[in-house]
Image: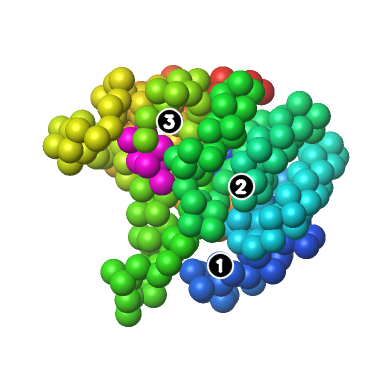
Amino acid sequence: MTFDRTPKIALEEHFMAPGFIDYFNKTAINISPDLFGKALTALQDFGERRLAAMDLIGIEKSVLSLAGPGVQAETETATAIAKSRECNDFLAARIAEQPSRYAGFAHLAMQDPKAAADELQRSVEQLGLVGAMINGQTNGAYLDDDRFSVFWERAAELSVPIYIHPYNPPDFPYMYHNHPELFGPVWSWTVETGNHALRLVFSGLFDRFPKAKLLLGHMGETLPYQLWRFDSRWEISNRGERRLQLKPSDYFKRNVWVTSAGVCSDEPLRCAIDALGVDRVLFSVDYPFEKAEEAGRWIEAAPLSDEERRKVCHGNAKALLRL
Ligand code: MN
């Protein structure tokens, strides 16, 4: 060991449950077959291999989430609901085997917002999960749609974060035509997920549910870089059709937290902290799609004060997830 190991909690750490591999196979169009095959083995391990990767960089606790898209890609609503429950029971059982090392985010069937709200509540109150991860749009619906009010109301009541994780848009946008490298983690997932978050902000969702908590990975999907421009341009683009109680940037500083999942780079880290505040940025790896060692080495050497590093590595996660 040649680097420090500030105690860490990591929030975008993925697993695979039996019965969900067919959904995961849909992401094969977004990543190389080689990485895909290697990832699948690592995703299914809850023991030695995963714990060794965590120990190597001082991750005391990993908050586990199903590798997407899961039931987000299920066309039968009843199946999606049943399988989401199955997934949460499976995850809770794995956590129960290593309760000091693992926590988890619920997997939900957003096809039925009321059922998703009920399953979120069951997951938090009965299974001890600490929030939920949602893999983007569901059959073309984004979470700013009115039908999801019942879900946001429950999430706000439970005071747990909803993590929006990248997935593909409902159609294939022409702008990615002939550029497969752009369709996936290089760019389209950032566009899709950042846009999803902006839909939530500009819809006034956080005026209706001021206590709702949104988590984004990948250092905020580039949004922290853009806050000033959101504030300066949104009213003229809005044509007076919507009203917000606060400036767009204010919602990012009140309702949004971001993780470093999948980004090991000083400049966006500093930007996220300087734009959102040091209490809103949380360390993550995006295991097994990123290497824990690289993420650990990077955060230990990143240009942060000791207090900032402690907050990013574990303090902020403890406060947000009430661990
Ligand atoms: Mn991920």
Mark 2 surroundings within 10 Å by alpha-carbon count, few (fewer than 14), some (14 through 19), many (20 or more): many
Image quarter hosting the C terminus: top right
Q: CA distance from mark 2 to mark 3?
A: 17 Å
- Identity of the residue drawn at 69% across and 69% down: 22
Residue 293 position, x and y percent, is 55, 49
Q: Earlier in the sequence, mark 1 or mark 3?
A: 1
The picture places residue 88, in percent across and down from the top left corner, at 76, 44
Name the secondary structure under disc 2: loop
- Asked whether mark 3 lies closer than 8 Å to ligand 1, one says no
Q: Residues within 10 Å of mark 3 (few under 14, many from 20)?
A: many
Q: CA distance from mark 1 to mark 2?
A: 19 Å
Q: Quadrant of residue 183?
A: bottom left
Q: Quadrant of residue 235?
A: top left
18, above or below 6, in the image: below
Over which residues does the magenta segment extend? 196-202
Q: Earlier in the sequence, mark 1 or mark 2?
A: 1
Kindly indicate whether the residue at mark 3 contacts the one at mark 1 (C-beta within 8 angstroms). Answer: no
Q: Is residue 66 visible?
A: yes
Q: Residue drawn 66% across and 31% down?
A: 130
Picture colour scheme: rainbow
Identity, as a three-letter code, of the amino acid under mark 3: Leu
Report the front residue among 210 and 48. 210
Query: Which secondary structure type mostly characterizes the magenta part of the structure?
Result: helix
Instruction: Name the residue located 78 percent from the left edge and 46 percent from the top edge.
Output: 85
Q: Position of residue 79 (x, y in %)?
A: 75, 57
Reading the chain from its start, which is encountered first: label 2 or label 3? 2
For disc 1, the marked residue is: 27
| Quadrant into which the N terminus falls | top right
To which residue does mark 3 refer? 205
Judging by the rendered image, the residue that carries numbered circle 2 is 110
Task: Select label 1 or label 3 by which is in front.
Answer: 3
Percent x, y for residue 217? Answer: 47, 43
